[in-house]
């Protein structure tokens, strides 16, 4: 989870889908990319620079400096607005982000806290109930987890931790969650209503 003062802006994103002729539902033929932020998994639609070609899964810079391939972030979008190709690519791209940032995601198991007196934030991950939670908390008090392999070896019968995180991220992207661990919650803009 984030600290309260941490800003939720994305510097890098991954291409979920690239539509060189734009959306068929749109009257314009500007190239459109559906992208997902690396840090907060923010779903965005962007226009590309002229003659830029993007590949699904490609990491692109979208921060405030000079951008290589992305010209303009058009809007934030909901999961339901993703193309089918983008939805199909989503899980693999999320897993790649988790692999490339293993320490960040392992630290969730090391530092996660209770949400309230009845529920711990780790219980939001599919497959983690009271028994796994108790073991995780006990083991991390003995020694912090160093990797997913370390976590899996010390918490018996725990499913693949990367897959658990990935499933939770997709659930949060789909929306309507009470608590968010990984995703910046989508709030519709007033001018879109």
Image: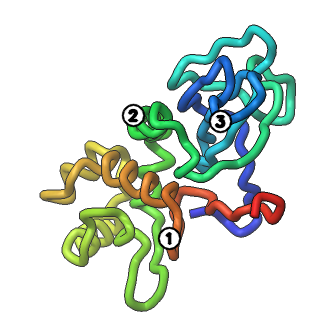
Mark closest to the chain's N terminus, 2 or 3: 3
In the depicted structure, whether residue 107 falls above or below residue 86: below
Query: Which residue is denoted by mark 2 in the rendering?
Result: 92
- Name the residue at 35% across, 72% down: 123
The one nearer the camera, 171 or 30, is 30
The one nearer the camera, 174 or 192, is 192
- Name the residue at 63% across, 58% down: 184
Relative image position of residue 48 (x, y in whole percent): 75, 22
Query: Which residue is denoted by mark 3 in the rendering?
Result: 25
Relative image position of residue 125 (x, y in whole percent): 35, 63
Question: Which of the numbered marks, if any, corresponds to residue 156?
Answer: none
For the rendered model, the colour scheme is rainbow
**Are the two marked residues, 1 and 2, in contact with CB atoms closer than 8 angstroms?**
no
SS at badge 2: helix
- Name the residue at 54% across, 32% down: 16
Task: Find the distance from the CA under tag 2 to the CA under tag 3.
Answer: 27 Å
Task: Find the distance from the CA under tag 1 to the CA under tag 2.
Answer: 22 Å
Of labels 3 and 1, the one closer to you: 3
Q: Residue 90's quadrant in the figure?
A: top left
Q: Is residue 100 visible?
A: no
Q: Which quarter shows the C terminus?
A: bottom right
The one nearer the camera, 30 or 98, is 30
Spot the residue most to the top: 51
Query: Which residue is denoted by mark 1 in the rendering?
Result: 177
Task: Find the distance from the CA under tag 3 to the CA under tag 1.
Answer: 29 Å
Q: Is residue 125 visible?
A: yes
Mark closest to the chain's N terminus, 3 or 1: 3
Relative image position of residue 105 (x, y in whole percent): 45, 50
Spot the residue most to the left: 157
In the depicted structure, whether residue 67 falls above or below residue 185: above
Q: Which quarter shows the N terminus?
A: bottom right
């Amino acid at each position: 989870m984030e600290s309260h003062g941490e800003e939720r802006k994305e510097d890098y994103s991954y291409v979920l889908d690239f539509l060189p002729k734009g959306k068929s539902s749109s009257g314009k033929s500007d190239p459109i990319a559906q992208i997902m932020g690396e840090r907060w998994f923010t779903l965005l639609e962007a226009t590309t620079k002229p003659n830029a070609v993007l590949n699904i899964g490609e990491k692109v810079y979208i921060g405030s400096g000079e951008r290589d391939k992305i010209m303009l972030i058009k809007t934030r979008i909901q999961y339901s607005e993703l193309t089918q190709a983008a939805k199909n690519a989503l899980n693999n791209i999320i897993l790649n982000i988790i692999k490339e940032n293993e320490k960040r995601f392992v630290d969730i198991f090391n530092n996660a806290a209770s949400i309230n007196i009845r529920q711990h934030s780790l219980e939001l991950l599919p497959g983690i109930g009271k028994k796994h939670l108790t073991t995780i908390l006990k083991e991390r008090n003995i020694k912090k987890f160093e990797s997913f392999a370390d976590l899996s070896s010390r918490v018996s019968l725990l499913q693949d931790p990367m897959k658990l995180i990935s499933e939770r991220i997709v659930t949060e992207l789909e929306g309507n969650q009470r608590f968010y661990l990984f995703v910046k919650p989508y709030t519709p803009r007033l001018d879109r209503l």
